[in-house]
Image (tube, rainbow, N blue to C red):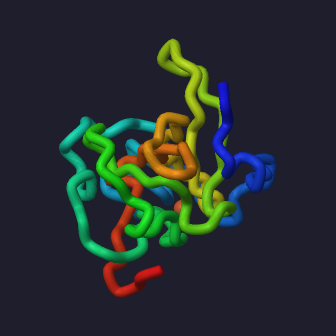
């Protein structure tokens, strides 16, 4: 398994700086956000708010508002999920080996709150070679802020 370049910058052992109980998260998030961010769920392809969004801005974590991805790095993957070539800043996310569902994948989490965002695959068409495949429900597009 080739780990993406972001792995080198990520020190995954660092605990999230924002820590809340599951009850607190459940109160603050919508059911769809909670299922993805706190239960590592996956929204159905082509159903999320942002897979076909072409607006400019910064995609923030829906749980803690940390800036995670820039619209500049968003590309058409055909997957039905928002896809990015790299994080807005390398240490915005942490990467973890994920062996669930009879696959080996690399899970992507928000560094600040530990929320599950999606996975990164080494088949991106972009210069980085990485395809960050992220659930819309984990993101909030901040259209006021551009990178
Ligand atoms: Fe977060």
Identify the residue shown where x is 48% and y is 35%: 123
The residue lying at 53 percent from left, 18 percent from top is: 103
Position of the N terminus, as image quadrant, is top right
**x%, y% of residue 37?**
46, 49
Lateral position of residue 9 relative to residue 125, left or right? right
Q: Residue at x 66, y 31 (%)?
A: 2
In the picture, measured across the screen, residue 6 lies left or right of residue 101, that is right
Residue found farthest to the bottom: 144
The answer to whether any part of residue 32 appears in the image is no
Above or below for 78 versus 28: above
Q: Relative to the observer, which residue lies in front, 30 or 92?
A: 92
User: Residue at position x 48%, y 57% from top?
Assistant: 25
How many numbered discs? 0
Q: Quadrant of ligand 1?
A: bottom right
Q: Position of residue 84 (x, y in %)?
A: 44, 54
- Residue 54, compared with residue 47, is above or below; it is below
Examine the image and state in which quarter residue 79 appears: top left
In the image, residue 142 lies at what x, y percent? 36, 77
Q: Is residue 85 visible?
A: yes
Q: Position of residue 128 (x, y in %)?
A: 57, 50
Q: Is residue 75 left or right of residue 91?
A: left
């Amino acid at each position: 398994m080739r780990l993406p370049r972001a792995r080198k910058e990520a020190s995954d052992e660092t605990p999230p700086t924002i820590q809340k109980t599951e009850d607190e998260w459940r109160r603050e998030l919508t059911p769809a956000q909670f299922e993805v961010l706190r239960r590592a769920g996956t929204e159905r392809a082509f159903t999320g708010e942002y897979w076909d969004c072409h607006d400019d801005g910064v995609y923030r974590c829906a749980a803690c508002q940390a800036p995670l991805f820039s619209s500049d790095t968003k590309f058409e993957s055909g997957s039905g999920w928002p896809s990015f070539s790299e994080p807005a800043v390398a240490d915005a996310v942490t990467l973890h080996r994920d062996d669930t569902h009879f696959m080996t994948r690399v899970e992507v989490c928000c560094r600040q709150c530990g929320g599950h965002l999606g996975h990164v695959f080494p088949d991106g068409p972009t210069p980085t070679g990485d395809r960050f495949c992220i659930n819309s429900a984990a993101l909030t597009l901040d259209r006021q802020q551009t990178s």
